[in-house]
Amino acid sequence: MERLFMEIMMDLWAGDVIVSYKLFIEEINKRISNLQSHIGTEAHQKETALGIIDETGMSWEQQDENLQKQINEYQELLEYLENDSNWTL
């Protein structure tokens, strides 16, 4: 979770923006939404139609499974950040 937190933070800092809690949460939600848009038969067919060449060597099911794992990591971080008890003693 710490790795993912720092990855997002570094990306935001690289954009030379003032990082706020709201912006950080919005960024996590954008990343989740983006990953979700690449899951499923329809998404894979659209990418094929656009001429995107898959060089992963994985089946669509394997790709979807990996994307879902990434989504789960982002959701875990989001839940951690939204839990007020993580910030109080």
Image: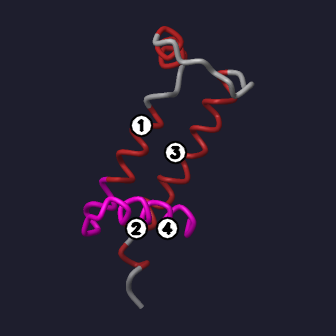
**Colouring of the image:** secondary structure
Residue under label 2: 81
Answer with left or right where residue 73 lies relative to residue 11: right
Residue under label 3: 71
Magenta residues (range): 1-26
- Sequence-wise, the earlier of marks 1 and 2 is 1
Answer with left or right where residue 17 lies relative to residue 52: left
Disc 4 versus disc 3: nearer the observer: 4
Number of other residues with Cα within 10 Å of mark 4, as a class: few under 14, some 14 to 19, many 20 or more? few
Q: How far apart are marks 3 and 1 (CA)?
A: 9 Å
Number of other residues with Cα within 10 Å of mark 2, as a class: few under 14, some 14 to 19, many 20 or more? some
Q: Position of residue 57 (x, y in %)?
A: 74, 25
- Sequence-wise, the earlier of marks 1 and 4 is 4
Residue under label 1: 34
The kind of secondary structure element at disc 3 is: helix
Residue at the spot 57% in from the left edge and 39% down from the top edge: 68
Identify which amino acid the numbered label 1 is placed on.
Asn
Please, what is the dominant secondary structure of the magenta stretch?
helix
Q: Where is residue 35 in the image (x, y as percent from the top left)?
A: 47, 37
The kind of secondary structure element at disc 2 is: helix
Q: Where is residue 78 in the image (x, y as percent from the top left)?
A: 42, 59
Q: Relative to residue 46, is residue 65 depicted above or below?
A: below
Residue under label 4: 6
- Sequence-wise, the earlier of marks 2 and 4 is 4
The kind of secondary structure element at disc 1 is: helix
Residue at the spot 42% in from the left edge and 66% down from the top edge: 9
Q: Relative to residue 14, is residue 67 depicted above or below?
A: above
Q: Where is residue 43 in the image (x, y as percent from the top left)?
A: 48, 19
